[in-house]
Image: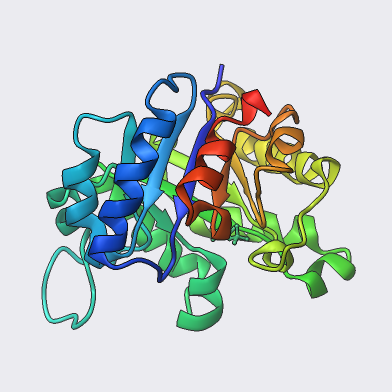
Amino acid sequence: MRKPLIAANWKMHKTTAETRDFITAFVPLVKDVEDVEIVIAPPFTSLAVAAKFLKGTNIKLSAQNLFWEEQGAYTGEVSALMLKDVECEYVIVGHSERRQYFGETDETVNKRIKAAHAAGLKVIMCIGETLEEREAGKTFDVLKTQLEGALKDITAHDMLVIAYEPVWAIGTGKTATPEMAEEAHRFIRDQLAGKFGQDAAETIRILYGGSVKPENVASLMAQENVDGGLVGGASLQPDSFAKIVRFKNS
Ligand code: PEP
């Protein structure tokens, strides 16, 4: 039985004061939720304040990226140890915006996952096809390549969450239909079974990401292989993110 996981990816949004205000408003809205794992990924600058205000709540903290070296002359980078130090439990790796704007590749995603796991951080690893790739009928090829490259020599499947995020659905208001999401998630689970074995693959959460909103979350979550959501825009307001977390009530 996979516990649903709903994660907020705030991207480059919210100052420390806005982070504090969000958490203060959000915590009471979800404090009774036990059957969904809730994760918030603020920008680096808000992690420490988020950790302070999330202490003792049912909400976990994630970073949005990390660098694979432990320390050194890497101006502007943040290590796994630094994320542990501010009480992160998760880190997002390989988001399509990082692939698109910052040159992230499956190889560098793989290095980041290894560094995260070595430090005891759980990883939310993002994969997904562009519109061009989908229209050319290459969706499964792309997902297979991304999974193979990013998961090379990774063994800690219990520290891994996959987020299927079709690039054409991120921040565009376009959502994959529940059937499209299920088809991709089923494919991903089969690939995970090939790598980690069927029993392990059945335990790995596969999140859907791409314009998840209070109005569409329940139909996505009703799919057998959709185990949660990675939410961008709709996670920035406490009431809208709380409605998504409480998808069972909608
Ligand atoms: C995301 O940030 O991963 C995302 C899916 O964004 P949005 O929900 O805004 O499409």
Colour scheme shown? rainbow
Q: Nearer the viewer, residue 75 or 18?
A: 18
Farthest residue to the top: give it: 1
**Residue 195: x %, y % from top left:** 57, 39
**Residue 199: x %, y % from top left:** 57, 21
Q: Is residue 8 left or right of residue 122?
A: right
State ligand 1's quadrant. bottom right
Q: Is residue 230 left or right of residue 12?
A: right
Above or below residue 71? Residue 49 is above
**Residue found at x 66% / y 56%:** 210
Above or below residue 104? Residue 213 is above
Q: Is residue 151 visible?
A: no
Q: Is residue 20 left or right of residue 12?
A: left
**Residue found at x 48% / y 73%:** 98
Q: Nearer the viewer, residue 12 or 133?
A: 12
**Residue 182: x %, y % from top left:** 77, 39
For the C terminus, which image quadrant? top right
For the N terminus, which image quadrant? top right
Q: Nearer the viewer, residue 1 or 196?
A: 1
Q: Is residue 96 visible?
A: yes
**Residue found at x 67% / y 56%:** 211
Count of marks placed on residues: 0
**Residue found at x 36% / y 63%:** 65
Q: Nearer the viewer, residue 202 or 5?
A: 5
**Residue 35: x %, y % from top left:** 48, 19
Above or below residue 234? Residue 248 is above
Residue 24: name its quadrant: top left
Q: Is residue 149 left or right of residue 215?
A: left
